[in-house]
Image: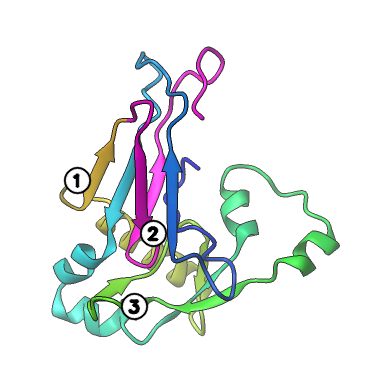
Amino acid sequence: NMLWHTDASFRPVPGALSMLYAHAVPTPGPKGDGATEFADLRAAWDALSPAMQELVEPLVAEHSIFHSRAQIGFTDFTAEERAAMPPAQHNLVRVHPGSGRKTLYLASHASRIVDWPVPEGRLLLRDLIEHATQREFVYRHAWRPGDLVIWDNRATMHRATPFDDRQYRRE
C-alpha cells in the first residue's frame, strides 16, 4: 500500500471508486503518521507538454499485481496464482466517463508499455509517475478516527505513508 497505485488496475475491469473509513489511526512519530496521499492524474495530464501528450496518448500499459509485488521483494508466486490473475492492458491515457477530461492511468502495477522494449517502457512509466506525484498534484490526508474518504481510481493514484506499525494500529 506504500507504492503509488490505483486499486485493481491489474484486473480487466479495474476499480472505479474506493473508500476508507478510519477506525484507529497511529499517533504521529519519527516513523511517520500513516497518512494517505492522493495524486490527481487529470492535473498531471494537463501539465504534460503537448509533445509528451502526443507521445503517450496512443500507448497501452500492461498492469500486473505480480509486477508491483516484485518491486517490494515478493517473487515466489505459484503457476496457479499467476494463472488466476493474468496481466490486464489499459490505455495509458483515458477519458473520464463522468467529466470527459483526459487523465493518465498508471501506477505501480503498470509493468510495461505494450509494443515497446521493456527498459524504455519502464523508464517512461517511472518518469510519468514521478511527474504525477509532484507536490502540486498531491493531496495528503492525515487521518482522524471517523474520517471517511472516497476517491475515484479512474483519475487518481494513492499510497499510504509510513508509521510505526509495531506500536500503532492503522485500521
Q: Give the mark toward the camera: 2 or 1.
A: 1
Q: Amino acid at mark 3?
A: Val
Neighbours of disc 3 within 10 Å: few (<14), some (14-19), many (20+): many
Q: Residue 91 is drawn in which quadrant? A: bottom left
Q: Residue 127 is drawn in which quadrant? A: bottom left
Q: Judge left or right: residue 156 versus residue 47.
A: right
Residue 96, percent from left and from top: 31, 76
Neighbours of disc 1 within 10 Å: few (<14), some (14-19), many (20+): few
Pick the front one: 66 or 1: 1
Q: Residue 13 is drawn in which quadrant? A: bottom right
- The residue shown at (36%, 41%) is 148
Q: Earlier in the sequence, mark 2 or mark 1?
A: 2
Q: Amino acid at mark 2?
A: Arg
- The residue shown at (83%, 56%) is 78
Tell me the distance, in whole angstroms, between the alpha carbons under discs 2 and 1. 16 Å
Pick the front one: 21 or 85: 21
> In the rendered view, would you say 44 is above or below 73?
below
Tell me the distance, in whole angstroms, between the alpha carbons under discs 3 and 1. 21 Å
> In the rendered view, would you say 95 is above or below 111?
below
Residue 57, percent from left and from top: 31, 83
* Residue 158, magenta (yes or no): yes
The answer to whether the residue labelled 2 contacts the one labelled 3, judged by CB atoms less than 8 Å apart, is no
Tell me the number on the disc at residue 28.
none
Q: Earlier in the sequence, mark 3 or mark 1?
A: 3
Q: Report the residue marked by disc 2.
A: 126
Neighbours of disc 2 within 10 Å: few (<14), some (14-19), many (20+): some
Look at the numbered disc 3 and give the secondary structure of its residue.
strand
Q: Report the residue marked by disc 1.
A: 135
Query: What secondary structure characterizes most of the magenta part?
Result: loop
Look at the numbered disc 2 and give the secondary structure of its residue.
helix
Tell me the number on the disc at residue 93.
3
Residue 44, percent from left and from top: 22, 63
